[in-house]
Image (cartoon, rainbow, N blue to C red):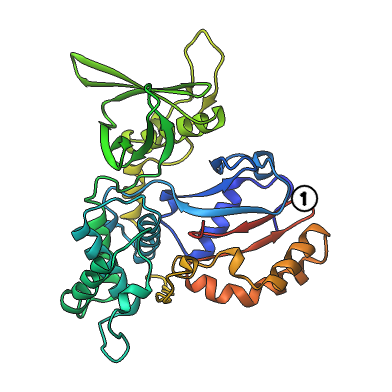
Amino acid sequence: MLQRDAKGQYLFDLICHHLNLLEKDYFGIRYVDPDKQRHWLELPKSIAKQMKSQPPFTMCLRLKFYPPDPAALKEEITRYLVFLQIKRDLYHGRLLCKTSDAAMLAAYILQAEIGDYDPGKHPEGYSSKFQFFPKQSEKLERRISDIHKTEMIGQTPETSERNFLQKAQMLETYGVDPHPCKDVSGNPAFLAFTPFGFVVLQGNKRVHFLKWNEVTKLKFEGKTFHIYANQREDKKIILTYFAPTPEACKHLWKCGVENQAFYKLEKSSQVRTVSSSNLFFKGSRFRYSGRVAKEVMEQSAKIKREPPEIHRAGLVPSRSCPSITHGPRLSSVPRTRRRAVHISIMEGENSASALLHMRSYRVRETRNFCLRSLFLSKISQVYIVPYTS
């Protein structure tokens, strides 16, 4: 049950408890408002006050801060969830790489999720039945199969996932969550914040990279975003970009503030409230709430418990339904069941009745790390749908 004044932290802790996740500081809850603008749920604030739409609310568990060295995470459950996120990044074209790297990453996914090559189970062209990338050629698929057959033999799922993470973290676009913008000439660009700094991508190429210790200030006014940096004592630069809307620009700025604090600071006590504008104009004020990367890693080193059981989901062959591979979407629930759930929410029927419609579907979802929990109260209802949208 979510109470009227439930805060984001309560919901986040509830999800992490369900997943038996201790290294939770890397994750966050994302939602999209009616104007299609993405947001991160602010954990110290009331959930209801952050929502612009009417319930039910659909939210997604996402990797918010990419670990600088994901293969070195303390617990296997955390590495598995990061693996799922990066696999999703590959599928959505966010993690860019050469063909050789793409083939190796896809082969690790195959090994982790279907095991060793078995000619009795895996006929000619078997890799073509799985969608790893937005577009993939037959030549690439043959290369994926060749690597899987010859170089992956004997690797356990955990080993394959760890190798996948080690490979992925070396790529320039590791950790990129792109924000579409335009530069001062009107050319499209994607801005992103990674564990290592601020990135600008244009035409699938990295055109700017600023390390976090070089970034001195982030500012936005309306749709205009500025980033100030000192690359050398004698070289100060200002980069300016334009977001599609003021709301998108504010979201970009807040993401930058949080990432800079998380990766750059030594301890959370150094976090300060920042303003979006200068002293003479009224602007937005925002403060990152949470531990910083160094504190998170120190805390992780202290974890001592029996490793939690992981229910991995094998790949389901489907070129036409990526939601099967990357977690079922709400649309994959039978239409009659979707309608029954929707009506029970909107018309205020007994919450237990609504949950019955969902529980039969939750078994497969949980195995895929797709937790769709329905929290019902008189005020708000929330769907949690990790890694599906």
Of residues 306 and 6, the one nearer the viewer is 6
Mark 1 packing: few (<14 Cα in 10 Å), some, or many (20+)? few
Q: Residue at x 57, y 58 (%)?
A: 14
Q: Is residue 323 left or right of residue 382?
A: left
Looking at the picture, how far across and down is residue 123, in whole percent?
30, 86
Instruction: Name the image quarter holding residue 107.
Output: bottom left
Q: Residue at x 45, y 61 (%)?
A: 21
Q: Position of residue 71 (x, y in %)?
A: 26, 58
Vertical comparison of 326 with 128: above or below: above
Q: Quadrant of the N terminus?
A: bottom right
Outermost residue toward the front?
A: 138
Q: Write the residue at 41% across / 74% down.
A: 312
The correct choice, above or below, for 286 with respect to 306 in the image is: above
The amino acid sitting under disc 1 is: Ile
Q: Outermost residue toward the bottom? A: 120
- Residue with the most extreme top position: 280
Q: Is residue 38 above or below residue 3?
A: above
Q: Secondary structure at mark 1?
A: loop
> Left or right: 130 with respect to 72?
right
Q: Which residue is mark 1?
A: 379
Place of residue 93 in the rendered image (x, y in percent of width and height, measured from the top left): 36, 52
Asked where in the image residue 340 lies, by quadrant, the reply is bottom right
Q: Quadrant of residue 150?
A: bottom left
Query: Along the line of sight, which residue is nearer the eye, 249 or 129?
Result: 129
